[in-house]
Amino acid sequence: MNSGGIATHGFDKSSRKRMVTNQVKTLVRHMTARRLVNVLKTEMNRVLKRDIIRSMPFVLKVESTNICNLNCRYCYGGREKPGIGERPFGRMSVDEFKGVIDRIGIWLLKINLYGYGEPLLFPETLDMVRYAVDANIGVTVSSNMNFENTDFCSRIVDSGLETLIVSCHGTTQPVYEQFMTGGSLQRALDNVQGVLDSRKKKKAKYPIVEWQYCVTGFNQKQCQEAVALAQQLGVDAIRFIRPLFPEPPAEQWLLAEQPVQTDLKAPVFRCPWLYRAVFVNYDGGVMPCCRDTRNADNDFGNIFEQDDFSSVWNNEQFQYARRLMSGAGSTDVKPPVMCVDCIDSHSRMAAEERSVGTHGTEEETGHEAL
């Protein structure tokens, strides 16, 4: 799936290497002496499998909202009304976001400002981007680009956003809406073009625009058309990846040449999230990763309630999770942490993948930031 000068990746080793190289460049761009020391401490803690660590996360993933304007199949429980113990729908305020950056921003190299909601649904997201950029932190946003305000395209460029990931999974409306229910392909493409035109007009270097295309059985034949369309638009890269399914999907979603993957997974005993990164929900709930943000019981603490983030970063749950991933903990002891399910699901899928000889990419496992 490679064609004439535009990067396509998601299926092969060279593509994944190119993606990792771009991520490293982002980290280097925002490096300071303090951050470099922190990264080195982080990697030492990870290699030594320490449960109490004297370093801070250098990658932050923030879900500014879990509200979305589309209803993509298999996403976030089908957008059903949250039940008991599930996180309500809501959004983070700009002041709350600033509070997060003021607490841990000096350590951060990168922020992924997206989760299961649509971050560009609310214009204040760009104020969050600007605040982080002014703190010398690279920011990435993933969007379905279905906003109706065309002036927003210019604001995206002005915000200093470093990377814009465009989720678009088809090249014709019937195929597109089979995945992205309630969305308009033409509106998304027009907005992407608007961002690129504004970037060119302002002679700006950013944002880098990446088209992310989740390949399924019903849209696989449009991959080459997507490459051609990406070149026509002028996007910087297009990524073809397998979608993640929380449950066995209908047959038309499956690829003939690849087995279905029905859950997130992290490499056993090597999960980097517990050392390098942290996930913050819109309500301040802190989680080790983005595995299941809908379940509020998965929170390891709340960043809004602690002035000193290290008290959360090294609390009982984080310590136990690190011991668990290093092989020193038992899945049968307390406190309960979501990482137990991650190990269980990985063990099942690792056995399945060994039998067919396939392996998931970093994008597919939810560890794209690391």
Image (cartoon, rainbow, N blue to C red):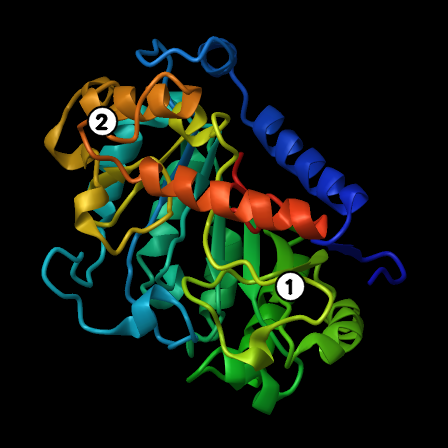
> Residue 198: horizontal and vertical position, in percent?
60, 63
Report the side of 359 relative to 310 (left or right): right
Quarter residue 171 falls in = bottom right
Q: Which mark is residue 317?
A: 2
Instruction: Evaluate whether residue 278 shows in this view.
Output: yes
Q: What is the spatial separation of the Cα atoms under label 1 and label 2, in whole angstroms?
A: 44 Å
Kind of residue at badge 2: Gln
Q: Nearer the viewer, residue 66 or 195?
A: 66
**What residue did someone put label 1 on?**
196
Location of the N terminus by quadrant is: bottom right
Secondary structure under the numbered disc 1 in the rendered image: helix
Quarter residue 148 falls in = bottom left
> Residue 292: horizontal and vertical position, in percent?
32, 51
> Residue 158: horizontal and vertical position, in percent?
49, 52
Kind of residue at badge 1: Leu
> Residue 213: horizontal and vertical position, in percent?
63, 66
Residue under the point 29% across and 38% down: 287
Residue under the point 56% across and 51% down: 364
Residue 202 vertical placement versus 367 (above, below): below
